Amino acid sequence: MTGLRDRAVYSLSGKRVFVAGHRGMAGSAVARRLASEDCEILTAGRETLDLKDQRAVRDWFGAERPDAVVLAAAKAGGILANDTYPADFLYDNLMIEANVIEAAFRTGVEKLLFLGSSCIYPKFAPQPIPEDALLTGALEPTNEWYAIAKIAGLKLCEAYRRQHGADFISAMPTNLYGPGDNFDLETSHVIPALIRKAHEAKKRGDRALVIWGTGTPRREFLHVDDCADALVFLLKNYSGAGHVNVGSGSDVTIAELARLVMEAVGFEGALEFDRSKPDGTPRKLMSGEKLAAMGWRAKVGLKDGLEDAYAWFLGNVAEK
Ligand code: GFB
């Protein structure tokens, strides 16, 4: 449980807030959400600042002097991308988080929020997964590279708090989806992949939609705008050493998800399973008790969220 000493009010008013990764799905949602706060949003595109370059990051922080940081920059992707590019997922994420967290500490950043992922937990963690299940068992092999980098990131925040008293906190969002998602079939997560596949199947008049694996794994999904709202809530209201789960509180099987996507897209064919592709973790529903006890809850239901994500796909990705 969250103790009273973990609660703190941090005012964003008049602050310079650096959103690292503002072009990604999570970072762009955080920037949209911060626009309604009385703060100045700082961003730096990849062409001006390579977050894997330690010196560049130090120099940037020295010159820009942000008061607060949301560390949403990451090399992220779906189950196949994680399995195919283990070196990139481990190295890129370690470098980004080490450089940003160290530079934030050196330049006296008042508050930093690090974004992790629900894959930090053991493959067979108790469900719903409480925060203290961390490091109690072996990881899911398809994404252990990413998970280890994210565990290192949250431990860095904890270590800088313990050794230096820095107010660095961590949030672990569940599988996110929504505007700004990656719809590339090889590297994306399941929701954008199924939206694209169902849309294209409908256009071609296909008989069936083919999904990866057995359809039996369960996943918890959170609309990225809900996630951004939770992150700003934590930035303002949480100041503890322990990381905080950020989820929607319920999960569905991948087959159920596929049917919901087909409904949102208006594709009426059958569902087929490509069992040569991996299932990954059987289930990863996180416990949202810690965040709920602070007074935050998700608002966007999966059905509405999928309609919103499909509308964004139609307006921004689908060929006109
Ligand atoms: O979203 P996803 O790629 O990642 O896959 P994870 C979730 C489930 O959907 C898996 C199935 O069981 C997939 O086999 N699936 C079915 C599909 N059809 C498809 C498809 O067309 N594309 C994709 N991508 N999946 C990731 C981790 O795990 O979750 C990351 O690899 C990160 O590290 C992220 O933690 C949140 O949920 O399995």
Image: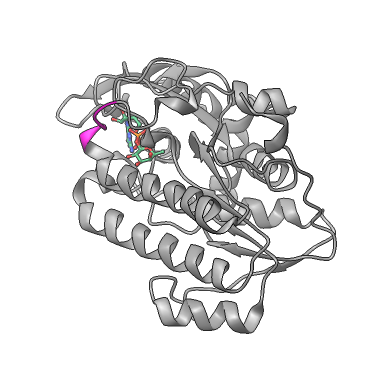
Left or right: where 97 falls relative to 311: left
Q: Is residue 154 visible?
A: yes
Q: Is residue 317 visible?
A: no
Can you give x and y, in whole percent of width and height, for residue 296 in the image? Answer: 71, 29
In the rendered image of this protein, does residue 63 appear above or below residue 18?
A: below
Left or right: where 3 falls relative to 37: left
Residue at (48%, 76%) from the top-left corner? 57
Residue at (42%, 15%) from the top-left corner? 127
Pick the front one: 165 or 294: 165
Residue at (50%, 79%) from the top-left corner? 58
Can you give x and y, in whole percent of width and height, for residue 78 in the image? Answer: 34, 42
Which residues fall within the magenta stretch? 137-141
Can you give x and y, in whole percent of width and height, for residue 131 in the image? Answer: 48, 28
Residue at (19%, 32%) from the top-left corner? 277
Magenta part, dominant SS: loop
Quarter occupied by residue 254: top left
Q: Is residue 138 magenta?
A: yes
Q: Specify the color scheme.
A: one colour
In the rendered image of this protein, does residue 40 appear above or below residue 311?
A: below
Pick the front one: 75 or 145: 145
Can you give x and y, in whole percent of width and height, for residue 70 in the image? Answer: 60, 57
